[in-house]
Image: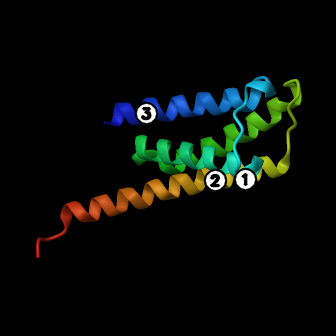
Amino acid sequence: MTTLLKLLAWLLAAAVAFATLGPPGLRPHSDFGQDGEHALAFVLIGLAFGLAYPQRRLLTATMAVAVIGLIEILQFWAPGRHARWSDFVVDALAACAGLALAAGIGWIMGRSRFAEPS
């Protein structure tokens, strides 16, 4: 299961990197708007990485924020893309929210394993 979660996390990260840095015409669009799309994508990435690497959530959060910043900076050189401070903030907060959600799920799962039967 852990290997599958790791694969899913990295595939999500690659898909978001392509959507962020690739040609604008190939980027998927939804009714959520730009901030909603960003938030959903990065919450899912945070959740996936948080579940895949439960022993390294703080390191994962730090790396996620750094990589999100790097992706925003790389958009300066990507044709048709625009680096925005607001995108960085939404993406970083959403990734950390996904990691926090993963931590909560892990905590609940850990408590349920050790709960005494009624």
The mark found on residue 1 in the picture is none
Q: Is residue 111 above or below residue 69?
A: below
What's the residue at 79%, 23% (across, down)? 23
- x%, y% of residue 105? 39, 58
Left or right side of 79 for 38: left
Callout 2 amino acid: Ala
- x%, y% of residue 11? 52, 28
Q: Is residue 61 above or below residue 13?
A: below
Q: Nearer the viewer, residue 3 or 58?
A: 3
What's the residue at 61%, 41% (across, down)? 63
* Cβ–Cβ under 8 Å for marks 1 and 3: no
Callout 3 amino acid: Lys
Of the image marks 1 and 3, the number of the one nearer the N terminus: 3
What's the residue at 62%, 49% (across, down)? 40
Residue to which mark 2 is pinned: 94
Q: Quadrant of the N terminus?
A: top left
Question: How far apart, in angstroms, are the residues tagged by discs 1 and 2?
Answer: 6 Å
Residue to which mark 1 is pinned: 90
- x%, y% of residue 86? 82, 52
Question: How far apart, in angstroms, are the residues tagged by discs 1 and 3?
Answer: 24 Å
Of the image marks 3 and 2, the number of the one nearer the N terminus: 3
Q: Quadrant of the C terminus?
A: bottom left
Q: Quadrant of residue 30?
A: top right
- Density class for disc 2 (Cα within 10 Å; few <14, some 14-19, many ≥20) is many
* Cβ–Cβ under 8 Å for marks 1 and 2: yes
Left or right side of 29 for 44: left
Check disc 1 and report its element: helix, strand or loop. helix
